[in-house]
Image (cartoon, rainbow, N blue to C red):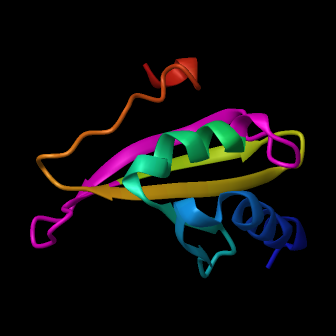
Amino acid sequence: MNSILKNYGSYFASFLQSSIIIVRFTRTGDLVFKVFKDSFVPFVFFAKHFGLALFKHVNDYTAIDYPEKKNRFELALHLTSMSFNSRIRVKTTLNEMSSIQTLSHIYKSIN
C-alpha cells in the first residue's frame, strides 16, 4: 500500500469525517472513498482544491446500474493528483428517484 495514499485517507477523514461512509484500499492499492450522496460534490471540491489533495485531473466518471439494489446506481469518479503522483476513486449511490448536482463547475471536462 502506498504510504502517500494512506496519508490521503487520514487527511480526508480528518476534514470530512461526516461525509465519508467508508475508506478502503482495493487489492491493487487504489484508495477508494464511498461518500454520502449529499456530500459527493463538496467532497470532490475539497479533493481538487485543498492542501495535500490537489486532485486536478479527472480520469473517468461513470455510473453502474445494480437493478437488484435499493440504491441501484453507483457513481464513480477517478481523480489524479499530478503534483503528488496519486489516484483516488470517489463513489456514491443513488436510486432512480434521486439526483445529484453536476460537477462541471469543478471540472470543466465533465460537461
Above or below 72: residue 56: above
Above or below 90: residue 51: above
From the top left corner, tell me how far across and down residue 88 is, in percent: 65, 56
Residue found 12% across the figure and 49% down from its top = 96
Q: Nearer the viewer, residue 10 or 91?
A: 10
Residue found 80% across the figure and 40% down from its top = 50
In the displayed structure, does residue 41 sit left or right of residue 2? left
Reply yes or no: does residue 70 show up in magenta: yes
Name the residue at the front extreme: 18
Residue found 57% across the figure and 57% down from its top = 89
From the top left corner, tell me how far across and down residue 31 is, in percent: 66, 67
In the displayed structure, does residue 66 sit left or right of residue 106? left
Residue found 48% across the figure and 50% down from its top = 39
Above or below 102: residue 21: below
Reply yes or no: does residue 60 show up in magenta: yes
Q: How many marks?
A: 0
Above or below 61: residue 25: below
In the displayed structure, does residue 45 sit left or right of residue 74? right
Where, quadrant-wise, is the C terminus in this rendering?
A: top left
From the top left corner, tell me how far across and down residue 44 is, in percent: 59, 42
* Quadrant of the image occupied by residue 56: top right
In the displayed structure, does residue 24 sit left or right of residue 54? left
Q: Nearer the viewer, residue 68 or 26?
A: 68
Q: Over which residues does the magenta segment extend?
A: 48-74
Where, quadrant-wise, is the N terminus in this rendering?
A: bottom right
From the top left corner, tell me how far across and down residue 66 is, in percent: 18, 65
